[in-house]
Image (cartoon, helix red, strand yellow):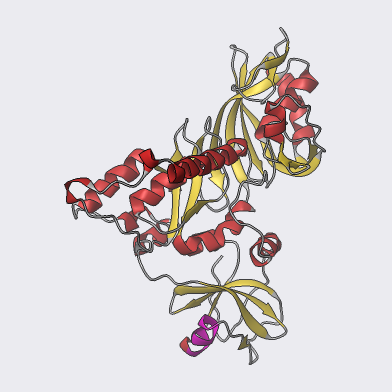
């Protein structure tokens, strides 16, 4: 929501923006895999640990010492790149690997993702480059939409196709029986996360304990399912659903719990994410298309800026406040700005500040002051102007 105002006038901030504000201003880790990103986050920690172990081995093993570059190839210097790339992640790729690939394609100095997506899943993986990493919490806290397929007749310990069968049944539910059950899983519900999840139990990841053969007892947590519909019910013992849910929801747990109540058991056999916060399926770019664009850009026939969405795209649900250049200079130095005049807002909350139509800072209004919390430096490669207009 973009509400440019004169002399600091602003509309009341949306309630869901306040939750994001708490995350981004609290100093807590951002964009990490803490078990609240949705399905599939359980393996990202393994990827990072393996990468660290490989790095340590390389540092101590003379066989892995750095060799001089062959053919006098110049080093690809990293650069400042700022914006969002919404990757249409292919099945089989980890989220950690996807970030590494895009960081290499863009030669970006900084990159991170906003919500891990399981290697077995496809769809929207928002990747923040450069200064966009400062807006990750606003995406993490947004709604997510999934299209998923449940295979009836078998429950697995991972609640998806990767696990081993723990319970089986020859029963197959009717479409009417499935639809009749969906209201029980809509709205604010209590959900027990899968035992193969990244939730910490006494300092250990639940999936690590489960892989070691330990019984993991996780407590139910409140999650919100905004919408859950049965899209297709096939004769092969599978059903296709669409779900729109809030932060912390596990789609795998939905399949598990629905199957238990129906008495036929079930697990996820296909999963695609179609919405993450403000990013829609139309914003997604397949990896092959990104690689092709990179090759064209290298030959001077295109620009990687065409693949970027502006940093402020992640801030669609909070108001924008336009300031003068003089006030912008103060904010850029980390100094507060007094909001004077009859148009000064009497409300409080988070805003994103612009000067001459350009993103400047995330700030908080309180006690008649505009206090900067995150200042952006967008020097370098940014989104093409046309990308903003495409989403209007």
Looking at the rendering, the stretch of residues picked out in magenta corresponds to 326-333
Residue 324 location (% of width, % of height) = 49, 86
Could you tell me which quadrant the N terminus lies in? bottom right
Whether residue 124 is visible to the viewer of this picture, yes or no, is no
Measured as percent of width and height from the top left, residue 387 is found at 38, 58
Question: Which secondary structure is most common in the magenta stretch?
Answer: helix
In the image, taking residue 293 as reference, residue 88 lies left or right, namely right
Can residue 380 be spotted in the picture? yes
Residue that appears at 67% across and 46% down = 36
Measured as percent of width and height from the top left, residue 368 is found at 69, 86
Kindly identify the residue that appears in the image at 60 percent across and 61 percent down.
Answer: 317
Which quadrant, please, contains the C terminus? bottom left
Closer to us: 33 or 243: 33
Q: In the displayed orientation, state which residue is furthest to the bottom.
A: 341
Q: Between 5 and 160, which is closer to the camera in this rendering?
A: 160
Say whether residue 18 is left or right of residue 7.
right
Snapshot quadrant of residue 39: top right
Report whether 52 appears left or right of 182: left
Up the image or down, 312 lies above or below 287; here it is below
Give the residue drawn at x 45%, y 72%: 377
Residue 294 to residue 137: above or below = above
> As rendered, which of 83 and 62 lies closer to the eye?
62
Count of labels in the image: 0
Q: Is residue 21 magenta?
A: no
- Vertical arrangement, residue 241 with respect to residue 19, above or below: above
Task: Work out which residue is located at the far top of the displayed protein and give it.
Answer: 170
Residue 309 figure quarter: bottom left
């Amino acid at each position: 929501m973009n509400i440019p105002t004169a002399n600091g006038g602003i509309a009341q901030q949306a309630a869901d923006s306040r939750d994001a504000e708490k995350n981004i201003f609290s100093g807590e880790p951002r964009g990490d895999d803490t078990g609240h990103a949705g399905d599939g986050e359980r393996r990202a920690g393994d990827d990072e640990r393996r990468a660290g172990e490989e790095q340590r081995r390389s540092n101590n093993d003379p066989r892995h010492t750095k060799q001089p570059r062959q053919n006098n190839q110049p080093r690809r210097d990293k650069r400042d790149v700022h914006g969002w790339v919404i990757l249409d992640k292919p099945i089989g790729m980890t989220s950690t690997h996807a970030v590494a690939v895009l960081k290499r394609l863009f030669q970006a100095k900084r990159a991170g993702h906003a919500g891990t997506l399981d290697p077995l899943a496809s769809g929207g993986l928002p990747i923040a480059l450069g200064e966009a990493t400062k807006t990750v919490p606003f995406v993490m806290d947004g709604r997510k939409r999934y299209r998923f397929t449940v295979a009836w007749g078998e429950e697995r310990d991972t609640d998806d196709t990767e696990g081993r069968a723990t319970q089986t049944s020859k029963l197959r539910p009717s479409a009417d029986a499935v639809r009749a059950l969906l209201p029980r899983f809509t709205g604010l519900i209590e959900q027990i996360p899968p035992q193969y999840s990244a939730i910490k139990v006494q300092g250990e990841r639940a999936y690590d304990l489960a892989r070691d053969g330990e019984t993991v007892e996780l407590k139910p947590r409140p999650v919100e399912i905004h919408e859950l519909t049965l899209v297709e019910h096939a004769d092969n013992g599978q059903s296709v659903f669409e779900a729109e849910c809030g932060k912390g929801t596990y789609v795998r747990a939905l399949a598990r719990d629905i199957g238990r109540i129906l008495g036929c058991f079930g697990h996820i056999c296909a999963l695609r994410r179609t919405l993450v916060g403000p990013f829609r399926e139309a914003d997604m770019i397949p990896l092959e298309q990104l690689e092709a664009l990179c090759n064209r850009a290298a030959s001077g026939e295109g620009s990687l800026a065409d693949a970027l969405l502006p940093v402020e795209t992640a801030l669609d649900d909070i108001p924008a406040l336009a300031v003068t250049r003089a006030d912008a200079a103060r904010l850029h130095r980390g100094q507060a700005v007094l909001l004077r005049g009859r148009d000064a807002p009497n409300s409080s909350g988070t805003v994103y500040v612009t000067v001459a139509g350009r993103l400047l800072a995330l700030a908080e209004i309180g006690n008649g002051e505009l206090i900067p919390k995150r200042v952006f430096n967008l020097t370098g490669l940014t989104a093409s102007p046309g990308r903003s207009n495409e989403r209007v």
